[in-house]
Image: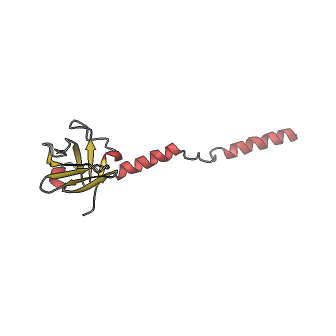
Amino acid sequence: MRKILVSLAAIALVAGCKGNAPAPEATGSDAVAAAASDAAAALPALPTDPKGTVTVAGSYSSAGATLKLGADDSAELTGADGKVAKGKWAWYSDGKRILLTADKSVWAVADGALYKLAGKDAPLTGLTADQAWAKAAQ
């Protein structure tokens, strides 16, 4: 009889714990994925009509580099190494991207940020934090 009671107690204990197991701890990769998700959510979205709604002139920065865009279409790109390239900037006909003549780089325009694109045919979707250049407060 004792063996039966011990067996029943063990079964009851296992059944009682079912569904109450501690949650698995987050791994380092889970934390990185969550941080990346939060960062993506914090990135400024591209407006439908940036040319008509965003003031592009201003100073932008990323990873120690700066980009100054003037209201007179002037542009000055200073790399993290201190190398300076001067030129002009202009809107593409789609009104969503600009081109810098100094280095022929293409940028998507958001309110409060620019996104450096791989080229003029790069998609305007899936933009990442490493492409973003934050606009300095004015």
* Total count of labels: 0
Q: Nearer the viewer, residue 97 or 119?
A: 119
**Residue 24, horizontal then vertical, whole percent:** 59, 45
Q: Is residue 71 left or right of residue 41?
A: left
Q: Nearer the viewer, residue 67 or 83?
A: 83
Q: Nearer the viewer, residue 83 or 91?
A: 83
Task: Residue at 27% x, 62% y: name it.
Answer: 137
- Quarter of the picture containing the N terminus is top right
Q: Nearer the viewer, residue 73 or 91?
A: 73
**Residue 119, horizontal then vertical, whole percent:** 23, 37
**Residue 112, horizontal then vertical, whole percent:** 26, 56
Residue found at the very far bottom of the displayed protein: 138
Choose top left, top right, bottom left or bottom right for residue 11. top right
Task: Residue at 83% x, 42% y: name it.
Answer: 5
- Quarter of the picture containing the C terminus is bottom left
Q: Is residue 40 left or right of residue 99?
A: right
**Residue 38, horizontal then vertical, whole percent:** 41, 51
